[in-house]
Image (tube, rainbow, N blue to C red):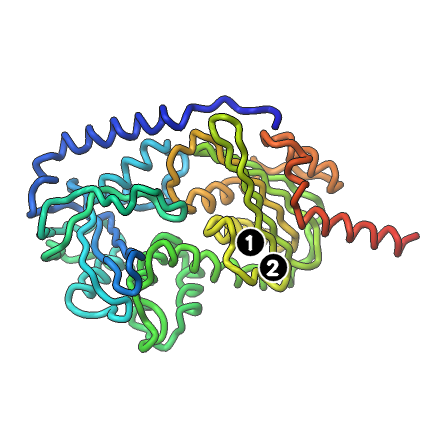
Amino acid sequence: MHNVKKISSTQEIRKKLEKNWIQFLNINSRELTNKNFSGSSPPSVFVGHQHYPKILVGPMVPPIHGNTSILDYPEKWIGKSIEEIASFRSSLVRGVYRTDIHRPFGKYIESLQELAMADIPAESELVFEKTPFVNIEQKNFDIDSAPYGLVAPLKNFKTLSPISIDKRIENIFYDKDLNSTQSILKLYQNGVEISKINRIFSMGMIGLKNNRKLVPTRWSIAAIDDIISTNLTKEIENYPNLELYEVHRYHHLGNYYTIIFIPQNNWIFEMQEAWINNKGKIVMGIDYEDYKRLNHYPSIAGAFFAARLAVSEYLDKIKKNAAVWVLREIHPDYAIPVGVWQVREGIRNATKEENIIKFESFDKALSYACTLMSLSKKEWLKNSKIYKNIKEQRKILDYLHF
């Protein structure tokens, strides 16, 4: 390693998070110790994965009234601190009840589906079987989903006022002749944010009538990023090649991103992750795909699909074809995982013009990219398939031009 960045320790950040959590509990103790609970849902719903296919599902509501949309709106979280984001999520109380994934209907589910279609916060009232508590099953944070707050078994749920519905979502909900992929792509093309598509996909609200089912939130996030980015990469293959090599960079929440765009005829995508702890120990992860696409679930999980979506959006926007190599370092100040939204939004920000530098050669682009990271060039190249692929292609071209 070289060029190690100054970092806050994981313990220091976790202490701040714990202090904020205790303060939240104290301020809202009256509401949080009552079985009758009310607040403005951002809107937000939760579909769990424990004990699948008999899963927990329910609304997420804070003990707060008014405009609470920021509490479950990842696209608006760029520039927020990890403490702020954790506070947003931990303020949401989940009321849950157990159901089967194959039953995306009934009075209770339909009330949640209506909530999921809302385009502004909805005043909600919940009656719990017992007072909210911390779910110990979530003591190990999920790297794909944002963290959650208290949970309680739900006895009753209703919204207290007419819900303002997003018509783009409502139209898809009632169109039961479109399959899930077609529905997701149509919503995306109509400008619906990924977080909102995820919400209704989880609630079994899209797809062919007889195929609809509830989908755990953590699984639906990866599925949506995969479906949209797969479609975009097929379009990208029809575009002319990028003229120059591009290096994009961005960092937030203890995550450092450097992305190299390489002029190339066929789609190639690789993402490397380096998790660095307080003692400097490094754990690497890597996934690679070519034009045949990935044939297994990525070892770096949903981060792969989130990154692929962000880079494919960029190439589709500029109407160019390229191979893409994403380098990601995760430092100790990323004290708790907040979800793969930060990968998607971080790389989306990396593709903004002010974060791009162009080069005429691959070697210069690669050397510059590695100077932006703590790991050395040698460490990044050691297991890279895309690097070996590019070098091999250059050897073939040199031979043909001999």
Q: Amino acid at mark 2?
A: Ile
Q: Secondary structure at mark 1?
A: helix
Given residues 286 and 60, the one toward you in this image is 286
Residue on which the image places disc 1? 312
Taking the spot 43% from the left edge, 60% from the top edge, the residue there is 223
Taking the spot 22% from the left edge, 49% from the top edge, the residue there is 60
State which quarter of the image contains the N terminus. top right
Q: Amino acid at mark 1?
A: Ser
- Cα separation, mark 2 vs mark 1, equals 8 Å
Residue 66 seen by the camera: no
Q: Position of residue 6 (x, y in %)?
A: 50, 22
Count of number-bearing discs = 2
Left or right: 61, with 384 as reference point: left
Where on the picture, by quarter, is residue 4?
top right
Q: Is residue 265 above or below residue 285?
A: below
Where on the picture, by quarter, is residue 146?
top left
Residue lying at the far top in this picture: please name it: 6
Contact (Cβ within 8 Å) of mark 2 with mark 1: yes
Q: Is residue 228 above or below residue 335?
A: below
Q: Secondary structure at mark 2?
A: helix
Query: Callout 1: 10 Å neighbours few (<14), some, many (20+)?
Result: many
Taking the spot 27% from the left edge, 54% from the top edge, the residue there is 46
Q: Name which of mark 2 and mark 1 comes first in the sequence.
A: 2
Query: Callout 2: 10 Å neighbours few (<14), some, many (20+)?
Result: many
Q: What label does residue 236 carry, if any?
A: 2
Left or right: 234, with 41 as reference point: right
Q: Position of residue 282 (x, y in %)?
A: 54, 34
